[in-house]
Amino acid sequence: MDTAIIDQERRLVTELPGPLSNELDARRRAAVASGVSSVYPLYVARGAGAILVDVDGNQLIDLGAGIAVASIGHAHPDIVAAVQRQVAEFSHTCFMVSPYEQYVAVCEALAAVTPGDHDKRSALFNSGAEAVENAVKIARHATGRAGVVVFDHAYHGRTNLTMALTAKNMPYKDRMGPFASEVYRVPMSYPYRDPEGMTGEEAAERAIELIERQVGVANTGCLVIEPIQGEGGFIVPAPGFLPALAEWCRANGVLFVADEVQTGFCRTGDWFACDDEGVVPDLITTAKAMAGGMPLAAVTGRADIMESVHSGGLGGTYGGNPVACVSALASIEVMQRDDLAAAARRIGATVTETLRGLQADLQGIGDIRGRGAMMAMEFVRPGTSEPDADAAKRIVAACHRAGVVTLSCGSYGNIVRLLPPLVITDGLLADGLAVLADAVHTALD
Ligand code: PLZ
């Protein structure tokens, strides 16, 4: 089936969810653990570009991209061709047993596109959480210091160590401890909720003072931070925050680890969110959009740090699987060739205009924020900054009922976020935003 011929338009042929999605949902309830939830029960049959087609034949606009993964769109022909070719050649040897060029080529590409022009090395893994865990392993090994500093509202994954790094208890951690030790949490720069006028440098000082007093520099191996927080609420720190932290890290032998699993690969209008202020991390974790939908993740970092780990100290059966690697190489090429960073900036401008219009017309939108194609609205009770999670929930559900996939997020669950494929057409984006605007009006009027 040639998925490329799916028209890039929203088309509903049943109520949503339709009968076949409902049937699948009944089967799911009897077979799939309910701990694994879905935002809305529309079962997908295929996709192309920014359109998903459900099992009932409804065409949905995807403004979530599978949580920032499908940046070059669904079923991109270059990915389809690269993956099909690779599967027919070989799909697994385990790089730790019999190596292959595809793994090497991905590490070369990562060295080229990640921030900084220093000598770099990479190691490949399967998921964002696995990459973050490995970044911590490497940082501890390189520095001989166990302490890991993370931030309020952070999200870094669901494995035991990354649960410890993740801030929010429900739904990620509740009754799932004990958690890994030597993890210390400090305040994030959160301009909407910080004291009025607090600068990035002041917010950095607030965090640094705590680290120095409660952990001690000599015990701190690394600081792990999302340059724009994802699951925690699309929180963009005040300008100066990241550079001040990076500077403090450099001065104190603490490694600055940027978790760009969600923000990376053109999403924010640059190749990486760190690029916006010229911050060069010691280690950077990537996943999601890197491989266009195949599971692949990486830790990339300064050669001296990466090379401090003894031979055999890093790995995993599937890490850097060849099929995922060719998918990554194809995705990165599309991002370069089609300048998807510029596309993200254009999407950001369009989305910002719509969201600002809504904020001006309605009570209850406390903040509009984000960068590039990573934009969000924070809902609050009118006239206060009290989180309104219910509004966000109703808006996401109303969008889905009208055929537009959106997501919520945030420590308080009161944020609606948009992460469209960077290849979305102007027409689809406009239609998706019109549906969103209707849903917001209905929820807040
Ligand atoms: N670091 C910054 O955004 C994954 C989580 C969805 P994995 N975000 C989506 C959920 O509820 O499980 C993420 C991230 C950042 C790490 C991760 C973890 O990446 O590939 O989900 O392990």
Image: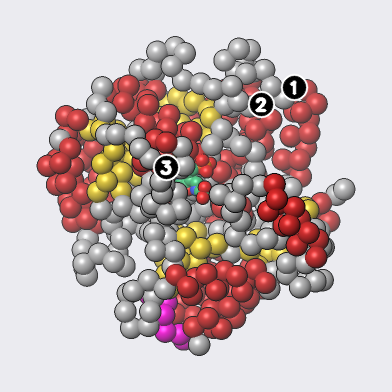
Q: Residue 176: which numbered mark, if any?
A: 3
The spot of residue 152 in percent (x, y) is 31, 52
Question: Does 12 appear above or below 250?
Answer: below
* Three-letter code, disc 3: Met
* Residue indicated by mark 2: 322
In primary-sequence order, the first of circles 1 and 3 is: 1
Where residue 276 appears, x then y in whole percent? Answer: 39, 51
Give the SS element for disc 1. Answer: loop
Q: Can residue 207 be seen in this snapshot?
A: yes
Asked if residue 363 is among those painted magenta in the image, a careful observer would answer yes
Q: Mark 2 or mark 3, which is nearer the start of the sequence? A: 3
- Horizontal arrangement in the rendering, residue 325 relative to residue 160 (left or right): right
Residue under numbered circle 1? 90
Q: Nearer the viewer, mark 3 or mark 2?
A: 3
| Residue 14 within the segment the image draws in magenta | no
Q: Judge by depth and name the residue closer to the eye, 111 or 70.
A: 70
Question: What range of the chain is rendered magenta?
Answer: 361-366
CA gap, disc 1 to disc 3?
38 Å
Name the kind of residue labelled 2 in the image.
Pro
Q: Residue 6 placed where, x, y %?
A: 81, 58
Q: Is residue 249 left or right of residue 101?
A: left
Query: On the rendered structure, is 26 left or right of 225?
Result: right
Q: Considering depth in this image, is 62 or 278 the residue closer to the camera?
A: 62
Task: Please say whether residue 112 is visible from this viewpoint.
Answer: no
Residue in view at x 22 percent, y 55 percent: 203
